[in-house]
Amino acid sequence: MQVNGERIGATFDTKREADDWIARARIEKNAAAQGKTGTIKTMGQAMQRYAEEISPTKRGGDKEVIRINALVRHEKFPGKIKMSDLTPDHFSTWRDARLKVVTRGSVLRDMNLVSSILTTARREWRWINANPMSDVRRPAEPDHREVVITRRQIATMLRTLNYGAGPIRSVQQAVGMAFAMALCTGMRAGELCALKWVDVREDHVILHITKNGKRREVPLSSRAKMLLERMRDFDDEKVFGLTSQSLDAMFRKYRARAGLSGFTFHDSRHTAATMIAGRMRSGDIPAQQAVMDLCKMFGWSKMDQALVYYNPKAADIAARLG
């Protein structure tokens, strides 16, 4: 079939299906030629196209597709509204309904995703002339977690995870080693689980995939080197031989078994930042260089990110003041 000088085609099982497709294709092509695609396409169709074309190109695209499908199913989401008819009120109503059942952080992430889809529909697909989400007020940023795992909690967790001097034989022990490594380096759970032996060097490890998508080299302390050496015979390819899912599940299981609560595996990153910063300051490293070293080690592109993860107690600061 030829529409506006462009030849398009497809294969169908029945003539009726073919006729329906021809009719839709002709309407869509004519609307696109007139810059009016938004009058025939719905928000739900924009979400579907984004999930099929854009999400698969992203790291974590599978999870994003799941989120998109969940958003479209929400009763207040304007999925059936034509793109040209969308207004900020549609999305503010949906936002308010979401805030009643999920946290501000979750709503912010959802709004950012929907806004990205609308921006793509405007810039690349030419379905709309403006992004209606631009005029929707975002919820306030959630408070940052300021949980530093205490030394007693660390000791209890490591003991429960059968952390000791012997060879590593079980997944339980591997989780304990990953927890200890996180406290030494500030590496995230996903980074630890993805770490391969080919990326281990004498004094650092190389992370090819990080949260911000950039390659990072993490320096190793003498204790971190010792932990790596103890893992040598556990898995031939990956250092800790764990998946992110198994690490998370096992950590929560043994935290409960230890009778502990109030912290997550990711809080080991806050704890590591606080402990490592303290050691850096106690040496001869100038304060500004210590901050820059910490940012480089943890993969922070802005120095103010250090304030999010560095959480000393007021009593500790007072003791250093003398």
Image (cartoon, grey):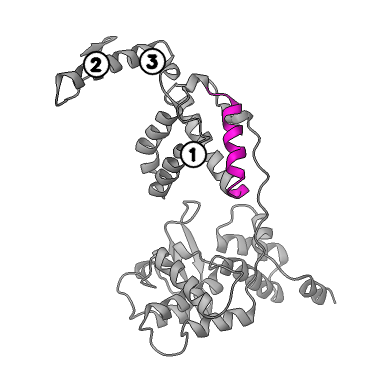
Q: Which residue is mark 3?
A: 32
| Callout 3 secondary element | helix
Left or right of 82 in this view: 235: left
Give the quarter of the image for residue 52. Answer: top left
Mark 3 to mark 2: distance in Å? 15 Å
Q: Rate crowding at label 2 as few (under 14), some (14 to 19) or many (20 or more) other CA atoms within 10 Å.
A: some
Q: Which residue is mark 1?
A: 74
Residue 22: mark in rendering:
2
C-alpha span from label 3 to label 1: 29 Å
Q: Earlier in the sequence, mark 3 or mark 1?
A: 3
Q: Is residue 75 left or right of residue 263?
A: left
Query: Is the residue under label 2 in contact with that under label 3 (CB below 8 Å)?
Result: no
Q: Closer to the observer: label 3 or label 2?
A: 2
Q: Give the position of the C terminus as an image quadrant.
A: bottom right
Question: What amino acid type is highlighted by mark number 3?
Answer: Ala
Q: Quadrant of residue 8?
A: top left
Q: Secondary structure at mark 2?
A: helix
Image position of 273 with respect to 78: above or below: below
Q: Which residues are magenta?
A: 86-105
Residue 102 percent location from the top left of the image: 58, 49
Name the residue at 59% across, 69% down: 263
**Badge 1 or badge 2: first in the primary sequence:** 2
Q: Residues within 10 Å of mark 3 (few under 14, many from 20)?
A: some
